[in-house]
Image (cartoon, rainbow, N blue to C red):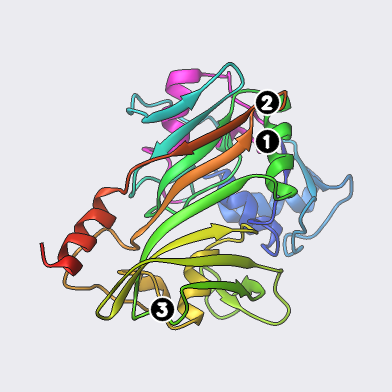
Amino acid sequence: MIFFIDENDENKRLDSFLSEITPDLSRSKIQNYIKSGAVKINGQDKKPSYILKEGDKIEFEVPEDEDLTIKPQNIALDIVYEDENMLVVNKPSGMLTHPTTIERENTLVNALLYKYGQNLSDINGEFRRGILHRLDRNTSGLLMIAKNNDAHEFLANQIKNHTLTKKYRAVVKGEYEKDTDVIDLPIGRNPNQPHKMMVRDDGKESKTIVKVIERFKNATYLELTLITGRTHQIRVHLAYKKHPVFNDTLYGAGQSKVKTEEQVLQSYYLRFTKPFGDEIIELEIEPDEKITKVLKYLKGL
């Protein structure tokens, strides 16, 4: 198995990362494999505590007696765009993008494997077949999927070079001060709460463009354009600005009177170059149920 580390997985421990992507293996078993030399980082042996860097290549020789297959599941996919090399799906809120150590079923990857089998890229390993980028479980919206490794690399280069445009909708607490804003604050992992990210001086460059769509009393409806794509970037940036995303309990918003499945945040727009040419694909979807529900409440409908 071969994995390439992107900006969402850097700064994780090697054993923690492998635990996430091989949920059938225990943490202690993974640590033993690392110590025995079954895991190489850029061709070298490393300790389980090695901190991953963007661009690292992990080679993991899984023993033949270990079953690390992911179960295909007949789960409906909302396909917004598809061609011979890729597709774009509208991931619903509540669905994980790929399996974890805790949850191994009912993820987007389980659904993709049922429909496409092995006709998905494997650059990021068996547990992330076809996956180019991710959305948090409770963030809905557009996700690109690669059907082969060449398409994966073509699209991944657009993400890396910031030539792909991703826009989000969000309802946030409080009245955002500016009609337009650029949040340019570095983000890194929270050392005291590893499942969270935070603004920190030694973090990675992170930039979010903010545009107000509509204002309400004690709330604002925003359009957000990602220039970089750090883990939890929008949620961290807005929480730092004292405008956390509605119902984002992880980053301090708490649950409002309007109950939803956590953060009211949707990836609604994608603009990218189709593999392997120069045709521009532009996709946009309607506001999801969470955003519609909260907006109706704020408008008094």
- Is 252 placed left or right of 18 in the picture? left
Asked if 270 appears above or below 146 in the picture, the reply is below
- x and y percent of residue 156 in the render? 69, 40
Kind of residue at badge 1: Leu
Q: Quadrant of the N terminus?
A: top right
Name the one closer to the observer, 212 or 48.
Answer: 212
Question: Secondary structure under badge 1?
Answer: helix
Residue holding disc 2: 275
Name the one closer to the observer, 270 or 204.
Answer: 270
- Alpha carbon separation for disc pair 1 and 3: 34 Å
Kind of residue at badge 2: Pro
Kind of residue at badge 3: Tyr
The boundaries of the magenta stretch are 102-127
Q: Check residue 106 for magenta coloring.
A: yes
Do labels 1 and 2 touch, CB within 8 Å? Answer: yes
Question: Secondary structure under badge 2?
Answer: loop
At label 3, counting other C-alpha atoms closer than 10 Å, the crowd grade (few under 14, some 14-19, many 20 or more) is many
Q: Residue at x 70, y 42 (%)?
A: 158
Residue holding disc 3: 176
